Image (tube, rainbow, N blue to C red):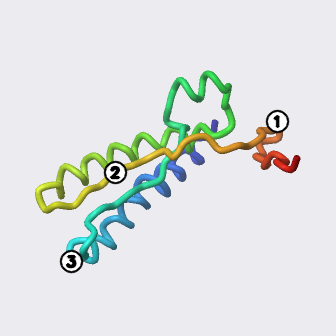
Amino acid sequence: MRLGNTMTSLYMIVVGDTHLFNLFLPLIQHGRIKKVVSVSSGMPDLDFVVDHEIDSAAPYAISKPGTHMAIANIHAQYKNDGIFFMSVWPGYVDAVFHKNGMYLRKDLRG
């Protein structure tokens, strides 16, 4: 694992998402629906990574919990204004993992 990749991932994911939320906050504050949802993944789940022996996305996996904490803090800051921030992981994707680090869709044809 290279430190540079980890720092880039932290900046892109944690700082990038935080900037995105802040940029859209005026629209959210004046909008009718006051909900912000960040789509996450299973990568910050320690059991998921260990059980599936995922070793190819460490910088991404390290940065996702940071995003979750940022969202929790932003939610705490704006919940009294009626704005709801949350992060969700929609679940598993039907994919095949290959040793070269590529994810490919399974052939679902009968």
Query: Residue tagged by mark 1?
Result: 99
Q: Is residue 10 left or right of residue 98?
A: left
Residue 68 point in image, percent of width and height:
38, 44
Mark 2 and mark 3 in contact? Answer it, CB < 8 Å.
no
Residue 97 in the image: state x and y as whole percent.
77, 38
Q: Which residue is mark 2?
A: 86
Q: Residue at x 18, y 58 (%)?
A: 78
First reached walking from the N terminus: tag 3 or tag 1? 3
From the top left corner, tell me how far across and down residue 82 is, in percent. Answer: 16, 61
The quadrant of the picture occupied by the N terminus is top right
109 left or right, relative to 17: right
- Crowding near the residue tagged with mark 1, few <14, some 14–19, many ≥20 C-alpha atoms within 10 Å: few
Q: Is residue 39 left or right of residue 1?
A: left
Q: Which residue is mark 3?
A: 30
Which residue does the image show at 53% across and 50% down from the upper left? 9
- As drawn, the residue found furthest toward the right would be 110
Disc 3 marks which amino acid? His
Q: Amino acid at mark 2?
A: Met
Crowding at label 2, few (<14), some or many (≥20) Cα neighbours within 10 Å? some
Three-letter code for the amino acid on which mark 1 is drawn: Lys
Secondary element at tag 1: loop
